[in-house]
Image (cartoon, rainbow, N blue to C red):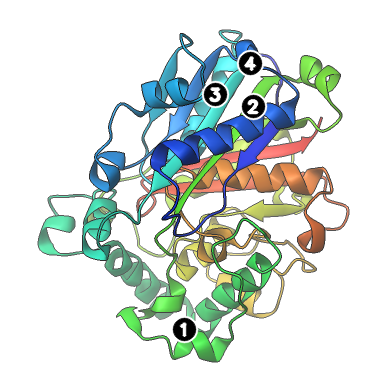
Amino acid sequence: MRSVSIVGVGLTKFGEQWEKSFKELIAEAGVKAIQDSGLERKDVNAVYGGCMASGRFVGQEHIGALIADQLGLNPVPSTRVEAACASGGVALRMGYMAVASGIHDIVAVGGVEKMTEVSTEDAGFALGGAGDQETELFVGASFPALYALMARKHMKKFGTTEEQMASVAVKNHGNAVNNKYAQFHREITIDDVMKSGYVSSPLKLLDCSPITDGAAAVLLMPTEQAKKINDKAVEIIASTQASDTLALADRENLYETKAAKIAGKQAYEKAGIKPTDVSFAEVHDCFTIAEIMAIESLGFCPLGEGGKFTEQGNTQISGQIPINTSGGLKGKGHPVGATGVAQAIETYLQLNGEAGKRQVKDAEIGMTHNVGGSGATAVVHLYKKA
């Protein structure tokens, strides 16, 4: 297996992109990534694009062909990857494996979603398909409701508080202020979160990630060649994925995400490192309780202590393990198909010292953690400067 590195990145502004079409978002991110790499379109051998629900959101399927067409990459093979909210992360893993195996030398990986073309109710229904349609969505269990069940169990077993969950949102909004691509550029307080109104108790409006439009893209190639292209190459030192039951009712418990725990453990083993070696991580905070459960599953703090760990400031940029320096899904935004790729871009920027006011000091190893649904899919990547 060959070592694989990211050599170029491209990101659109995240938010309500009324003036840009689905196709335009794809083209903007893809062109930026190619230009950033110093490569040319003719150099690209294959494309993997993450997209969850474009059929429901904009009436467009066959996304693989659309991406290649919009970027002028025909006739290279182009494949859509769908894994709910982990679509981007799994697309990155597919691209990584294609280069590592030697099947392709230069691969473009992208992610895109345009979610604001439909009503909030229709968007919620589309997102609900990431869970078990028969036992959850059909009986009215939205995604806020599913994560509320997980939050309630975590609170009952470990004493996690609503204020501790709110501290996740406060931190991530604070980080997003310094990210020009983020959807939200305003700081919030614990009091703001607590007064924002329940969506599904104990989760309030400001505990939830927003509906977002956006796209992200990266270029991958073998590390040895990447280092000759430019001095910004970032090596992917581990890529792992694990699964769990689709329905919450079939899980061993509701207070931890088993697939993330397994994928994280495997990633550490493949890279030959420990959680304490990680300089920073972008984790899947679709809801504030999700970040708390993620940092526990990934070994950054003991099971049950994620709320207290966050409240104490350990996940701040200057803390023990900076989490979601980009603003995360909560502050940066969550165009579901693009999220996993955007996480990799934040890692690329951090390891190259290009994150500006949100830069982590002496960053050496980064991690991304992208989750599909309520945890049925989890994909983890580890990175270092090539």
| Residue appearing at x 45%, y 61% in the figure | 286
Q: Nearer the viewer, residue 362 or 261?
A: 362
Nearest to viewer (mark 1 / mark 4): 4
- Secondary structure of the residue carrying tag 3 is helix
Q: Position of residue 142 (x, y in %)?
A: 24, 63
Which residue position holds label 1?
Answer: 162
Name above or below for residue 189 compared with residue 1.
Answer: below
Q: Nearer the viewer, residue 284 or 233?
A: 233
Q: Are marks 3 and 1 in contact (CB under 8 Å)?
A: no
Q: Position of residue 225 (x, y in %)?
A: 78, 14
Query: Could you tell me the amino acid type at mark 3?
Result: Gly
Distance from Cα at disc 3 to Cα at disc 2: 9 Å
Which residue position holds label 3?
Answer: 95
Name above or below for residue 11 compared with residue 73.
Answer: below
Distance from Cα at disc 2 to Cα at disc 4: 7 Å
Dot 2 or dot 4, earlier in sequence: 4
- Secondary structure of the residue carrying tag 4 is loop
Distance from Cα at disc 4 to Cα at disc 3: 9 Å
Q: Position of residue 45 (x, y in %)?
A: 57, 11
Distance from Cα at disc 1 to Cα at disc 2: 40 Å
Q: Quadrant of residue 210?
A: bottom left
Per the rendering, the mark at residue 219 is 2
Query: Could you tell me the amino acid type at mark 4?
Result: Ile
- Secondary structure of the residue carrying tag 2 is strand
Nearest to viewer (mark 3 / mark 2): 2
**Mark 3 residue crowding within 10 angstroms, few (<14) / some (14–19) / many (20+):** many
Dot 3 or dot 1, earlier in sequence: 3
Per the rendering, the mark at residue 106 is 4
Dot 1 or dot 4, earlier in sequence: 4
